[in-house]
Image (spheres, rainbow, N blue to C red):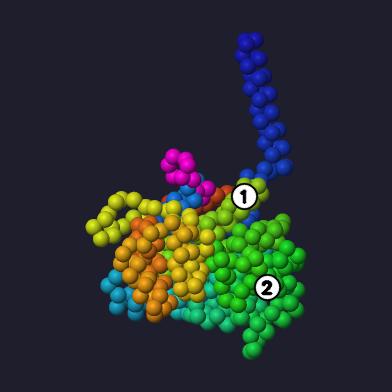
Amino acid sequence: MVFRFHSLGLVVCLVALLFAAGAGSAQKPDRTTRVAPKNIILMIGDGMGPAQLKAYRMYQDNPAQRGIEPLRLDRHLVGTLATDPKLTEAQAESLAHYQVTDSAASATAYSTGQRTFNGAIAVDIEQQPLPTILEQAKRRGMKVGLVATSQIVHATPAAFIAHVPSRRQYNEIADAFVDNQFKQQPLVDVFLGGGWQYFAREDRNLVAELKAHGYTVIRTQQELANAGAKVAGLFADVALAAAKDRPATQPSLATMTTAAIERLEQNNGFFLMVEGSQIDWSAHANDIAGVVQEMDDFHQAVEVALDFAAKEGNTLVIVTADHETGGLSIGRKIGDDSPYAYHVQPLRNLQHSMRWYLEHALAEKSLQTFLQHTGIELTEPETKQWQSLQQTPDKKQLWTLLLAIMDRVTFTGWTTNGHTGVDVNLYAFGLGAERLRGYHDNDFIGKQIQLWLNEAQQ
């Protein structure tokens, strides 16, 4: 009986201690008890399919170590996304096949949680406006930002702020950065990228209007450090320079991401979309060097976001792509040669973009710098092609030759100069990442972010 009494007393004491601990945690909830992330950073590698990721993983690998080292991003793979756009009724009746998405339709799926037709910017198939998660976040007291290495009015950033039936309506999209307002103030607190010419126009001076609303409007990286809380960074007339050739006046994507986070962080949280725009452009050109160089610029920005999320504790980072571009293959057959190999050292040797080598070769009428930097030896047919171009220079033909040389020595293959319909990888880190696991349509991301924004207010 005595033993039972002491055991019962011990149980009562333990229950009391657990109750007290529970009461204490109720009074001071741990940050991890949140049901929704406070901050959401959505990062989109335009054109970044699985092969682009593999090419970059090999490019950044340390050859002195055995095996291919994983990217930091690889630790956070949670699933895949289908990127198919939505067809209009007429298209559905006339097409006996699936359609491959463009950036506008895919970005709209991410920004609104609804799929739409190719070319559409945050409108449905009836061309009616769809509310975006950026607008929803702003109306819930959060700060919002957009960052891209393209012009900021390009398809992906445009789908978060504008509502137009065509991605080519650049002036109308630029107008939305002023006209789309909440409480008589433009919605986007921070936007950084290119596109000055769309804001400083003869028909409308959006630069002056932004300044009147309290924005610091800047054009160089040097001005970014001292810019105010509301900043419009327009670092080029159209797009920023390629990552490998970017001048000191233009920031890297990582620098812009850091600057945006510093200005958006606040008690009510923020939503930030960051796009590595020019992965897609390099893949459209079938330029494998450009792909891995732009991937490097994007991945460094991803690391900035991951570092912030790990430190802050209530931030979710989502990384994906809008589609794959180029039908890239790691390995190919060249003539009768199919060595089951992929050679990245020539890519690592490059000190500039392939466009830089093109212009240099045209100006100097020599491939010496390109060949010295890469360590490439021309084949006899390539030598004859180059000798012919020396006599009658043709920029397009020389560009084609340089790309073909790089594809040959690396064993890179391409199936198209456009987009493909392959699924894209989905990565997530931070609070709520587990809810993104699995295979989904791309509009799932927009829908899930909408749910989080609603939960954050409960």
Q: Which residue has dot 1 on it?
A: 307
Name the residue rendered at 63%, 45% in the picture. Answer: 32
Report, in whole angstroms, how far the alpha carbon at label 2 lies from the one at label 1. 27 Å
| Image location (x, y in percent) of residue 457 | 64, 58
Farthest-out residue, left: 336
Is residue 451 something that shows in the picture?
no
Give the residue type that dot 1 points to: Asp
Main SS category, magenta section: loop
Q: Along the line of sight, which residue is nearer the eye, 178 or 446?
A: 178
Residue 77: give x, y in percent of width and height. Answer: 47, 49
Total marks shown come to: 2
Q: Which residues lie in the magenta part?
A: 62-73
Nearer to us of marks 2 and 1 is 2
Residue 20 in which image quadrant:
top right
User: In the figure, is residue 241 to the left or right of 19?
Assistant: left
Q: Secondary structure at mark 2?
A: loop
Residue at the image point whose x is 66% and y is 25% from the top? 14
Give the quadrant of residue 181: bottom right
The residue positioned 49% from the left and 72% from the top of the image is: 364
Which residue was labeled with disc 2? Answer: 219
Q: Is residue 183 above or below residue 310?
A: below
Please tell me which residue is depicted at 31% across the width and 64% down the height of the picture.
380
Q: Is residue 218 magenta?
A: no
Which of 337/254 is in front? 337
Callout 2 amino acid: Arg
